[in-house]
Each structure stands twice: as C-alpha cells, then as structure tokens.
Image (spheres, rainbow, N blue to C red):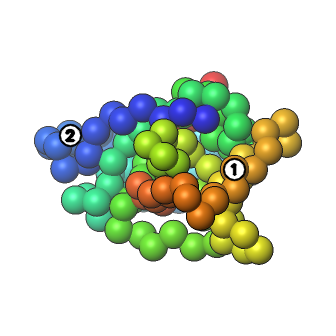
C-alpha cells in the first residue's frame, strides 16, 4: 500500500464544519424522528486530532490493509507523537519507500499487511526502517 502526503494539520486553519451529533446510539439505520435532540455539533478536528503539530494526512492506494478497514483511496490521520507499539498500524519508510502496514515487533520485526495475499516484510539488519507515525484514524468513502 503506497501513501501520498496530503499535508500537516498545522498547515493552515481548518474551518469548523458543524455536523449534527445525536445523543442516541444507532444500531442500524438513521435516528428516529422522535430522537431529534442533538447534543451539540461535533468538530471532527477536536474529536480525531490530539496533537495538531505532530499530525498529518496521507491518502493510500492499494488493498494490502483492507482487513484493517483501510481501503484504496482512504485518507489516514497519522500522529508522529505517538510511540509505535507491537501491532500498531504505522506509516513506515523502508529504504526510502513509504507504506502503511501493521508493525510487528515479535518474534522478529516486520511490517505486515492486513490482506492474506501479501507476505510480511521482514526488516533485515542492513535495512533502514523509519516509522513516520502511528495511524489514529482512517476515513474511507464508499
């Protein structure tokens, strides 16, 4: 899966777009007309971005992360300030090529796809692995 840099969240002012946020949970379908109470508008920047200075967006292409609900064309929200852990989904550079993969630190360090048709990428001693951030959200369109 290839990633294309879209920009940092700190590269300009993002306008507040007020979207209704309903108190009731929806299991299937749309909220009942009787449930017209809106808690308050939701600010997706406030909800999704914890560290503006360390957060950036990338668009992905490919299907190697489809089982992690990251589809072709998804926009990823990536935070550089989060320490990657075993099984984190990361944006990583392997010898200068960027990809989105699941970081596995045990038993050997590797970047694993979330699609069984792609094998894991094991990191050899002579290979350079740079973690460019941890994926905190994926925005897919259908």
Visible residue check, residue 127? yes
Please state the horizontal and vertical placement of residue 55, each as a whole percent of the image. Answer: 32, 55
Residue closer to the observer: 34 or 25: 25
Category of crowding for the residue at label 2, using alpha-carbon neighbours closer than 10 angstroms: few (below 14), some (14–19), many (at least 20): few
Which secondary structure lies at badge 2? loop
Which secondary structure lies at badge 1? strand
For disc 1, the marked residue is 121
Please state the horizontal and vertical placement of residue 134, each as a whole percent of the image. Answer: 48, 60
Residue most toward the right? 116
Please state the horizontal and vertical placement of residue 61, each as a whole percent of the image. Answer: 57, 28
Residue most toward the front? 126
Nearer the camera: disc 1 or disc 2: 1
Verify CB contact (< 8 Å) between mark 1 and mark 2: no
Category of crowding for the residue at label 1, using alpha-carbon neighbours closer than 10 angstroms: few (below 14), some (14–19), many (at least 20): some
For disc 2, the marked residue is 15
Residue 22 vertical position relative to residue 103 in the rendered view, above or below: above
- Say which quarter of the image contains residue 40: bottom left
Distance, label 1 to label 2, CA atoms, is 39 Å
Residue drawn 41% across the image and 55% down it: 132
- Say which quarter of the image contains residue 110: bottom right
Visible residue check, residue 34? no
Please state the horizontal and vertical placement of residue 139, each as a whole percent of the image. Answer: 52, 39
Residue drawn 33% across the image and 48% down it: 56
Number of numbered discs present? 2
């Amino acid at each position: 899966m290839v990633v294309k840099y879209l920009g940092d969240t700190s590269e300009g002012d993002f306008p507040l777009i007020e979207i209704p946020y309903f108190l009731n949970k929806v299991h299937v379908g749309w909220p009942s007309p009787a449930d017209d109470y809106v808690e308050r508008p939701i600010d997706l920047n406030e909800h999704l971005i914890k560290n503006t200075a360390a957060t950036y967006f990338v668009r992905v292409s490919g299907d190697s992360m489809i089982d992690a609900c990251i589809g072709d064309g998804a926009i990823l929200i990536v935070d550089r300030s989060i320490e990657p852990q075993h099984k984190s989904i990361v944006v990583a550079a392997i010898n200068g090529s960027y990809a989105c993969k699941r970081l596995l630190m045990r038993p050997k360090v590797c970047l694993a796809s979330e699609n069984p048709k792609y094998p894991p990428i094991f990191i050899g001693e002579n290979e350079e692995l740079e973690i460019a951030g941890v994926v905190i959200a994926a925005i897919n369109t259908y």
